Amino acid sequence: MGLFIPRKQHSMDTYASKTWRYNMSYPISHIQQHIQQLIFEQIHSAFNQKPNIAGTLHGQRRIYQGCLERRTSLFPSRKAGGSVALESFLELAYAVQLESHPAVESYRTQALKIPIGQNLELYPDFLIRTHKGDFEVHEVKPSIQHLSLESLQRFERLASILASINIPFKLVDANTLPQRQSLTQLLHLYSRGHLQDWTSLEIELAQDLLIRYELDDLEQAYSILEKDQLSPQLADYLLFHQIIQIKNAKWE
């Protein structure tokens, strides 16, 4: 998928021996198996969940809209099949990135509740399913460099637990996300490009037509499509999903 950074993996037993032995009578292996099974059950439940009557997909930790001191939002995701709840501008920027990334089939927010120690649980921001059927877990942070040692250790435990079931974990730094102006442009593309459901034939025709040209801007793409009696909004769709390239389109 190209989205995760390889991280040094540690044995789950290392953390289990330090964290899970207190007041526990079961062998560590049973605890590990229980956590692994819990994660798989939550993944299955998350991707089989249907939106509620308002069209929203909520995770293990519910994000309430309009919370004080939080920039909460609902993003209407085609890939998720409903509106995903987000609690920051950074999460919105990353959701848009996932929406446009060609390797991502679907994703959920706050979908996992993972115990990493005694009375300590983490709710990672994003659970991702790729087109290959693999899963990844990502957490968005304003600055990885400025995370506390305690936070880094928690994420290392989380990475170790997920590695034991072959699920990559990634910390995403805000510096890698679209800035406000670029995000506004991407959201505009997403909105225009998804005003209707395009058929695979329409998408293929538009793609085959536009890849013949070295496009300078969207207006040129619109004009080319209109001359062939295709909707100009197909250009927005193709550009958003990184199927075509346009010289002057920058989203960083």
Image: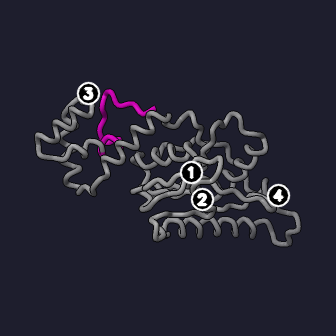
- Residue 67 drawn at (x, y percent): 62, 53
Q: Disc 2 marks which residue?
A: 64
Q: Which mark is residue 19?
A: 4
Disc 2 vs disc 1: Cβ atoms closer than 8 Å? Answer: yes
C-alpha gap between disc 2 and disc 1 = 8 Å
Secondary element under disc 4, as helix, strand or loop, is helix
C-alpha gap between disc 4 and disc 1 = 33 Å
Q: Which mark is residue 72?
A: 1
Disc 2 vs disc 3: Cβ atoms closer than 8 Å? Answer: no
C-alpha gap between disc 1 and disc 3 = 36 Å
Q: Disc 3 marks which residue?
A: 216
- The front one of 185 and 9 is 185
- The front one of 149 and 110 is 110
Q: Nearer the viewer, mark 2 or mark 4?
A: 2
Number of other residues with Cα within 10 Å of mark 1, as a class: few under 14, some 14 to 19, many 20 or more: some
Disc 4 vs disc 1: Cβ atoms closer than 8 Å? Answer: no
Closer to the N terminus: mark 2 or mark 1?
A: 2
- Amino acid type at mark 1: Thr
Residue 181, picture quadrant: top left
Secondary element under disc 2, as helix, strand or loop, is loop
Number of other residues with Cα within 10 Å of mark 4, as a class: few under 14, some 14 to 19, many 20 or more: some
Numbered label tally: 4
Residue range highlighted in magenta: 237-252
Does residue 168 show up?
no
